[in-house]
Amino acid sequence: MCAVVGVFGVENASQLAYYALFAMQHRGQESTGISSADGERIHLIKKRGLVTEVFHKGRLELLEGSCAIGHNRYSTAGKDSVLDAQPVFAKYKLGEISVAHNGNLSNKFEVRDRLIEKGAIFQTGMDTENIVHLIAKSSQEKLKDRIKDMLTKIEGAYCLIIQSRSKMFVVRDRFGIRPLSLGKLKNGGYIVASETCAFDLVGAEFVRDVKPGEMLTFHKNKEPKSEMIFESDPHPCAFEYIYFARPDSIIGGKTVYNMRLEMGKQLAKETPAKIDLVLPVPDSGVAAAKGYADGMGVPFEMGIVRNHYVGRTFIEPTQEIRDLKVKLKLSPIKDMIKGKSVAIVDDSLVRGTTSLQIVRMLKEAGASEVHMRIASPEIKFPCRYGIDTASKDELISAYKSVEEVCEYIGADSLGFLSIDGLKASLGDDTNYSLVSFDGNYFAGGNEETAGCSSYA
Ligand code: 5GP
Ligand code: MG
């Protein structure tokens, strides 16, 4: 997953990048980094940890200059080295460059092998380093042309923010798989960020989404220049709406919370249940559960309490810790649940770990029946475009039918949103990327290639 931000044309650029990264902490908790450019030099600080752990006032003051780019990295199982923190910085023929990337390049192995064959050396396991190499090796004169040259050699999902000592370049792949928006800062200057929730925090005005296939160039004292590098073929990621993005963010003109409500309502139409109460799996299932309750005309209650001091379960590298963490994180309100038939709604089911634990938890709390409802379709294929859904054999719905998964998690019934129902909820004005559900790898890659953006 990951978050990227670029701030251009303001004195306190690194501070604004810091706030933006803080607002987008949900997109990656493994490591964070900011690089700034002061016209002569690029300064960089990146480390493992949360935004508030890595940056403090003294550190931000070192990041001088009126352009800052930043990144929050999402953990990809077991490969959480500090070397894999971003932005990626390099010195090359034209001087200094720094790159932040959200996405996953589907031809990263071929590109890297070709570069290594020609003698390139790599310091990190990230596909982002391919981008830096391709820019450095390009025979074009100007950085902008080198970037364009590089773009002809990469495939897959990317939102790129590239910084030189005096300019900033922003590119979104032609499918627009990962979100990226442009905002205007109050006292001049611009901000580009993965999610609009970053604009709300720094008081920036939303201008528009960066277009799929578009490149924006930011120069000093000029308006940003827009060019279409590729013909756009929009396929925004449905999973941003289902799970990943913050509910207050607006992607493709749609508020994420409202989309989740719609998915819940649609789910109620498709898989109703005889229930007294609807409970969400907090926090990710809250909006969909509210929609399901509204659709069913049944009370919605926050019957499971979440301990907010434990990180997201998915982040942990090993299965044992993940199981433990679900129990540490969630706890039922017993006298609300005792003797009741309940529907419990989550946004998605990946390995089935969360559902299994929660059904058990609700049964132990005395629920007479537990009906699990998932506000997205069965995940049968690994995403290759920036969501770390690991390998296919970890996806329970890839191998088990709905009935078998229901039996595994121990629920009285299990219902998923259909693919058509998902499309109907999101609106039929757009072709969404539904690769996890339908296995259509339209931007390259396949179910066999590695899912995360790192190499072993
Ligand atoms: P499971 O427990 O079935 O493996 O995963 C389902 C849970 O993980 C759901 O509660 C969902 O909110 C969450 N989830 C789904 N996809 C992702 C992801 O890409 N990253 C993280 N951290 N959590 C996810
Ligand atoms: Mg969840």
Image (spheres, rainbow, N blue to C red):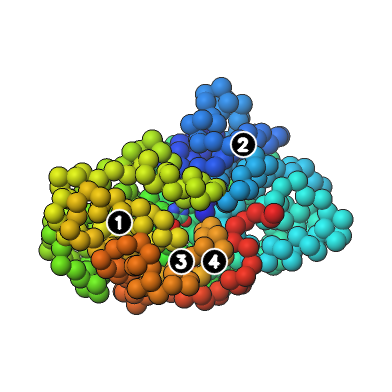
The first of marks 2 and 1 along the sequence is 2
The first of marks 3 and 1 along the sequence is 1
Q: Is residue 258 left or right of residue 240?
A: left
Give the percent coordinates (x, y) of residue 310. Answer: 41, 38
SS for dot 1: helix
Residue matched to label 3 = 396
Residue matched to label 2 = 46
In the rendered image of this protein, does residue 414 appear above or below residue 200? below
The first of marks 1 and 4 along the sequence is 1
Q: Quadrant of the C terminus?
A: bottom right
Q: Residues within 10 Å of mark 1 (few under 14, many from 20)?
A: many
Instruction: Give yes or no for contact between labels 4 and 2 (Cβ–Cβ under 8 Å).
Output: no
Instruction: Give yes or no for contact between labels 3 and 1 (Cβ–Cβ under 8 Å).
Output: no
SS for dot 3: helix
Q: Is residue 219 left or right of residue 91?
A: left
Q: Residue visible at 48% across and 71% down?
A: 398
Q: Residues within 10 Å of mark 2 (few under 14, many from 20)?
A: many
Name the amino acid type tagged 1.
Val
